[in-house]
Image (spheres, rainbow, N blue to C red):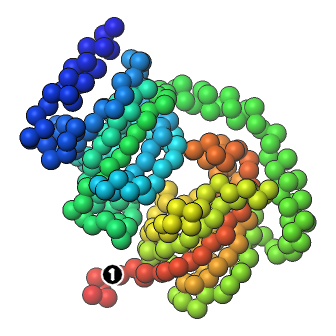
């Protein structure tokens, strides 16, 4: 019952806020300066707090509503590190709520993702983030559930090794794995520069399960993936290792056991299960070498 009063107050604010003062119709301005539009009220008093783990359907859009990412994510919410951060947006919500936020694109890519802006955005642009908040778990609750799940799937590791070997035999792959256990097979050699830490790389990739079913593809999204090589949390460990061995223009096949893919927990989206080997076809489109003050 206590939860209804702040929700109603927020709804009233959204409905009756003076649109003349907002450059975005239907959006209200937060105390931190970003804009928000609550689209669905929750029926829970479980409001997000710093340290919580949330599961949400999240999508990012340009201001013209062109989506450039969408997926289900489970993330830990931290104290906002700058005004208009995604954590500040999450902290406004409760379980079951859905909202749209307008945030600055520059800090999102440079501070949150620690990468360069994509070519279709610049430093002064804003972007939209849609959040449908499905679950909120306190840290103890999340870790308790995770431990129970890991105990249940403990025997899956051996089964994965059997499936991976069967796949290698069926495809007649006789390449030797790297020390980490992955297979890097060059399909088409590249003639450009190799990749070093700090370089910006642009790749197309298609991710499949061993049975050939797709689970991710930048080609289907018609948007190559661009990131700064060597920064944590950009790509999974196996993809980083393979890209680090490639040259601009190269096309390669990467066969990744779960240890260097999504591990014993699976992907945060739930699409890739725990202890699952995956196959990526990777095209290294561009390598932009890191610049230093000495080179300027």
Q: Is residue 160 left or right of residue 22?
A: right
Q: Is residue 207 left or right of residue 179?
A: left
Return the residue found at the far bottom: 191
Residue 21 placement (x, y as % from top left): 9, 41
Does residue 146 show up? yes
Residue 198 placement (x, y as % from top left): 43, 73
Residue 146 placement (x, y as % from top left): 62, 33
For the N terminus, give its image quadrant.
top left
Q: Residue at x 48, y 66 (%)?
A: 223
| Quarter of the view holding residue 192 | bottom right
For the C terminus, give its image quadrant.
bottom left
Q: Is residue 253 left or right of residue 135?
A: right
Does residue 32 show up? no
Q: Residue at x 56, y 70 (%)?
A: 204
Numbered marks: total: 1
Disc 1 designates what residue? 292
Q: Residue at x 44, y 44 (%)?
A: 58
| Quarter of the view holding residue 125 | bottom left
Q: Is residue 212 above or below residue 16?
A: below
Q: Is residue 110 above or below residue 97?
A: below
Residue 40 placement (x, y as % from top left): 37, 28
Q: Secondary structure at mark 1?
A: loop
Q: Is residue 263 above or below residue 222?
A: above
Q: Is residue 239 left or right of residue 119?
A: right
Q: Residue at x 63, y 65 (%)?
A: 206
| Quarter of the view holding residue 15 | top left
Looking at this view, is 271 or 159 the one in front? 271
């Amino acid at each position: 019952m206590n939860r209804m009063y702040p929700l109603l107050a927020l709804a009233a604010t959204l409905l009756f806020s003076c649109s003349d003062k907002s450059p975005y119709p239907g959006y209200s301005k937060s105390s931190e300066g970003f804009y928000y539009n609550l689209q669905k009220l929750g029926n829970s008093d479980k409001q997000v707090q710093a340290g919580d783990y949330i599961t949400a359907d999240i999508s990012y859009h340009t201001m013209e509503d062109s989506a450039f990412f969408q997926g289900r994510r489970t993330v830990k919410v931290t104290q906002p590190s700058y005004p208009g951060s995604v954590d500040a947006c999450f902290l406004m919500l409760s379980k079951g709520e859905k909202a749209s936020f307008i945030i600055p694109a520059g800090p999102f890519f440079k501070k949150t993702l620690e990468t360069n802006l994509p070519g279709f955005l610049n430093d002064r642009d804003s972007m939209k983030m849609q959040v449908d908040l499905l679950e909120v778990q306190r840290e103890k609750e999340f870790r308790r559930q995770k431990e129970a799940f890991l105990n249940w799937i403990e025997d899956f590791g051996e089964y994965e090794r059997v499936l991976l070997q069967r796949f290698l035999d069926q495809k007649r792959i006789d390449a030797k794995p790297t020390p980490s256990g992955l297979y890097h097979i060059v399909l088409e050699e590249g003639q450009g520069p190799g990749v070093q830490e700090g370089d910006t790389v642009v790749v197309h990739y298609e991710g499949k399960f061993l049975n050939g079913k797709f689970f991710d593809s930048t080609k289907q999204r018609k948007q190559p993936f661009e990131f700064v090589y060597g920064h944590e949390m950009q790509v999974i460990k196996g993809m980083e290792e393979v890209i680090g061995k490639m040259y601009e223009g190269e096309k390669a096949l990467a066969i990744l056991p779960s240890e260097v893919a999504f591990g014993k927990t699976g992907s945060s989206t739930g699409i890739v299960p725990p202890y699952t080997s995956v196959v990526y076809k990777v095209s290294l489109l561009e390598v932009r070498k890191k610049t230093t003050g000495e080179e300027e």
